[in-house]
Image (cartoon, rainbow, N blue to C red):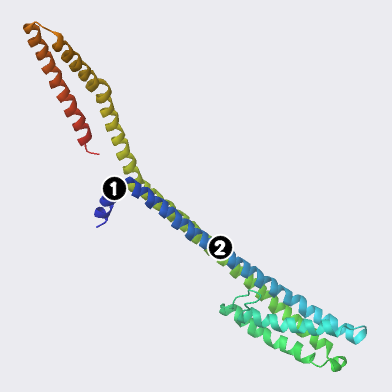
């Protein structure tokens, strides 16, 4: 079956083979560019997720610092409330995803287990600071301890996100490399089986045209010129013996001209 398909392409119009090559290049380019764009989108998502996870550590420290300031100095309740809201929302987004920020849904069971371990520490921090009127009664030692444990687990999560991102990048690099090699093999296959035979066929046809042109410009025109000359002499020659001799010469030229014509036909009939 494959041999029949190959022979069909080989015997087809060379222009069709060029179109096939051009179409293949276009399709492969689209596929490669699609994979590259997908890879860039994944890297952007991973970078955004790692960045947001890193900000969680900063937010937890900022919250503890703000509570200290509220108890022992000036306090910006608005910033404290905003930081607590961001801590909660980002924690949810890192697990469930967020279309607005571009964070994808988490599908890593190992990282999810660490988020489950992280949840009690977040709950303690947010619940203990829910009522700003009772900030003075917050156990700062327990709050600091929960914040430290939060940081330890969060550091682990950030590291896991980083490793997962690097693994995805390596996988995509391997896929892109395999696709590039596959594309190269396809192009070599097409050039070897389709384009190269077409080029050879065109070279043979070009050689035929050169042979025909040689017959046309040298032998054919030479014999035609001789025939015209003999014909002109016959018209003015009075001696019958000379006329007979001229006619024999004329017949020889006609025979040679027939041979030239046959050679031109043979050149055209040569297999490609």
Nearer to me, 46 or 9: 9
Q: Residue at x 34, y 43 (%)?
A: 196
Q: Is residue 190 above or below residue 151?
A: above
Q: Quadrant of residue 140?
A: bottom right
Q: Is residue 149 visible?
A: no
Q: Label for residue 152?
A: none
Q: Quadrant of residue 237?
A: top left
Nearer to me, 147 or 251: 251
Judged left or right of residue 139, residue 163 is: left
Residue 155 point in image, percent of width and height: 70, 74
Q: Is residue 32 visible?
A: yes
Q: Is residue 170 above or below residue 72?
A: above
Residue 73 point in image, percent of width and height: 93, 83
SS for tag 1? helix
| Lower sequence index among marks 2 and 1 | 1
Residue matched to label 2: 37
Quarter of the image with the N terminus is bottom left
Q: Is residue 22 above or below residue 131?
A: above
Q: Is residue 60 above or below residue 133?
A: above
Q: CA distance from mark 2 to mark 1?
A: 36 Å
Judged left or right of residue 82, residue 198 is: left
Nearer to me, 222 or 198: 222
Q: Quadrant of residue 144?
A: bottom right
Nearer to me, 152 or 3: 3
Q: Residues within 10 Å of mark 1 (few under 14, many from 20)?
A: some
Judged left or right of residue 66, residue 53 is: left
Residue 199 point in image, percent of width and height: 34, 40
Q: Residues within 10 Å of mark 2 (few under 14, many from 20)?
A: few
Q: Residue at x 8, y 5 (%)?
A: 239
Residue 85 point in image, percent of width and height: 75, 84
Residue matched to label 1: 10
SS for tag 2? helix
């Amino acid at each position: 079956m494959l041999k029949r398909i190959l022979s069909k392409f080989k015997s087809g119009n060379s222009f069709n083979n060029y179109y096939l090559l051009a179409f293949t290049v276009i399709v492969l380019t689209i596929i490669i560019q699609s994979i590259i764009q997908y890879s860039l989108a994944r890297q952007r998502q991973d970078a955004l997720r790692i960045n947001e996870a890193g900000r969680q550590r900063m937010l937890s420290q900022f919250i503890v610092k703000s509570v200290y300031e509220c108890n022992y100095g000036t306090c910006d309740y608005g910033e404290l409330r905003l930081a607590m809201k961001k801590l909660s929302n980002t924690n949810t987004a890192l697990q469930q995803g967020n279309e607005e920020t571009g964070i994808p849904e988490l599908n890593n069971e190992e990282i999810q287990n660490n988020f489950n371990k992280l949840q009690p520490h977040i709950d303690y921090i947010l619940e203990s600071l829910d009522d700003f009127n009772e900030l003075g009664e917050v156990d700062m030692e327990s709050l600091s301890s929960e914040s430290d444990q939060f940081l330890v687990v969060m550091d682990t999560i950030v590291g896991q996100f980083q490793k997962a991102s690097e693994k995805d990048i390596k996988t995509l690099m391997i896929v892109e490399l395999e696709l590039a090699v596959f594309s190269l093999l396809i192009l070599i296959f097409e050039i070897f089986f389709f384009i190269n035979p077409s080029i050879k066929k065109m070279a043979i046809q070009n050689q035929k045209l050169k042979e025909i042109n040689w017959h046309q410009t040298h032998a054919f025109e030479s014999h035609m010129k001789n025939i015209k000359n003999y014909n002109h002499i016959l018209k003015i020659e009075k001696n019958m013996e000379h006329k007979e001799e001229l006619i024999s010469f004329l017949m020889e030229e006609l025979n040679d001209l027939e041979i030239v014509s046959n050679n031109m036909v043979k050149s055209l009939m040569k297999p490609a």
